[in-house]
Amino acid sequence: MNWRNLLFTLLACSLYFHGDASAQVTATSRFLIEWNDLVVITMKTDGINPVLATRIYLYPNIAAREVMSTTSPENRVFSGNLNGLQPIEAPKNMIEHELAAIHAYYKVMLTLNYREQLCHDLYDRQIEVYKGFVPQAVFDASIAYGDKVAKIILAWAAADGYRETKARPYHHSTGRPGTWIPTPPEYRPALEPYWGALRPVTIDNLERFSQPPNVAYSADEKSPFYALARAVYDVSLDLSEEQRRIAEFWDDNPDLNNFQGHIPTPRRHINPTAHWMSIVGQVLKREKRDFVQCSQIYAAVAVAFFDANLVCWYDKFNYDLVRPVTFIQDNIDFDWLPLLVTPPFPEHTSGHSACSASCATVLTHFFGNDYAFTDSTHVASGLGVRTFSSFNAAAAEAGISRFYGGIHYMTAVQQGAIQGNTVGMHILNHLKP
């Protein structure tokens, strides 16, 4: 153990034995933030796609939340309101709840994260702190309860339908006018075409949150749909520097190849889920929320992203709408390319809009309508920081970034925001966090 960890252990030990519970919580409250920040890093390293990311964040955060929900009766509201998950029995013995929650998070994350050694390293460092002040009997009971919760959550995760989607047939484009086909430059196959078949966490019927396209497809130059595509094309030819910065800041394309001739150079980046989880971590550090509150907020945001993403993917492959790059090259300008690389799935609705709006709705519940913050997620990538007057303002910018980037019609942005807000409100009403 290095001197920093030793000092931290001694501090935690002193606070524990002097009975200063609030100070003890402050000393370890950042542990859950550290875990979610670690996942941001591993997702960037491995180029985890935005759809899979929602699942990777969901289950470990639910595991931690389920443990912390047993700290008091008022925290049990969340439990028992998740589809397919029965309320988990409270521990029979005295436990250190934070330790049990960290252990449960770690055990679940190990099955979902490719960077196992990084998980081991963080876990070992944090566990050393608890060993410094938790009596052995309580320590052992905490680990046992964390194991119990992790096994229940992993069994719940295994029944969500994800594995079954991998056995379904390859997704082929129908070839009908106005439907999606693979897009340049790599013409990748559809990403997770059956994701909408997974079990939602709080929603009983995805169709209830559907947002059908409100402009019918047409290649006629006088049609409203042609005008939608023309708007994407026109703005791309006259982007301001600010619009370009917005598009690039929210690009969040995790797995992109840059080409020089025929030679690809992989570029790794974080995905939209990790970007918003990074924002959550920044806010929680600033606000110095305790461990119980951190677990509550992370879990609620993870549910918001997961369920909003399911609804969005249900619409994408149900309506199967052509992307702007395809329509514009076929009907307006054969040589046109958008500023951003178009992701490999259909157009409607915008995932950035839906998921960001859902997340912002939940965060607004916890921090208020006018919570201003600065997002430093992309400093290391050279994209600087951006400051927002509220979470809803950040979500709106994330949505419009896809129009500026040339990869969504305005209808997908607008209807995606409506969709995400509706899902977010449903989650708040359902879970009452």
Image (spheres, rainbow, N blue to C red):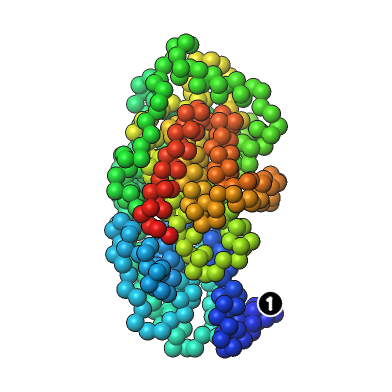
Judge whether residue 5 can be spotted in this image.
yes
| 376 relative to 76 in the view: left or right | right
Residue 355 seen by the camera: no
Residue 28 in picture, x, y percent from top left: 57, 74
Q: In which quarter of the image is the N terminus?
A: bottom right
Bin the neighbour count of mark 1 within 10 Å (Cα to Cα): few under 14, some 14-19, many 20 and up. Answer: few
**Most extreme residue toward the front, as rendered?**
369
Residue 10: horizontal and vertical position, in percent? 64, 84
103 horizontally vs 212: left or right? right
Number of numbered discs: 1
Q: Which residue is drawn at 50% across and 36% down?
A: 343
Q: The C terminus is located in which quarter?
A: bottom left
Task: Write the residue at 36% across / 37% down.
Answer: 210
Residue depicted at x 52% and y 51%: 364
Q: Position of residue 11 (x, y in %)?
A: 64, 82
Q: Residue at x 49, y 69 (%)?
A: 292
Question: On screen, 285 above or below 389?
Answer: below
Q: Which amino acid does label 1 sit on?
A: Arg
Q: In this view, does 381 lie above or below 367?
A: above
In front here: 278 or 81? 81
Q: Is residue 188 left or right of residue 5?
A: left
Above or below 1: residue 421: above
User: Is 112 on the left or on the right of 248, as rendered?
Assistant: left
Front in this rendered view, residue 114 or 347 = 347
Residue 111 in the image: state x and y as whole percent: 42, 62
The quarter of the picture where residue 75 lies is bottom left
Residue at which label 1 appears: 4
Please, what secondary structure does the residue beneath circle 1 have? Answer: helix
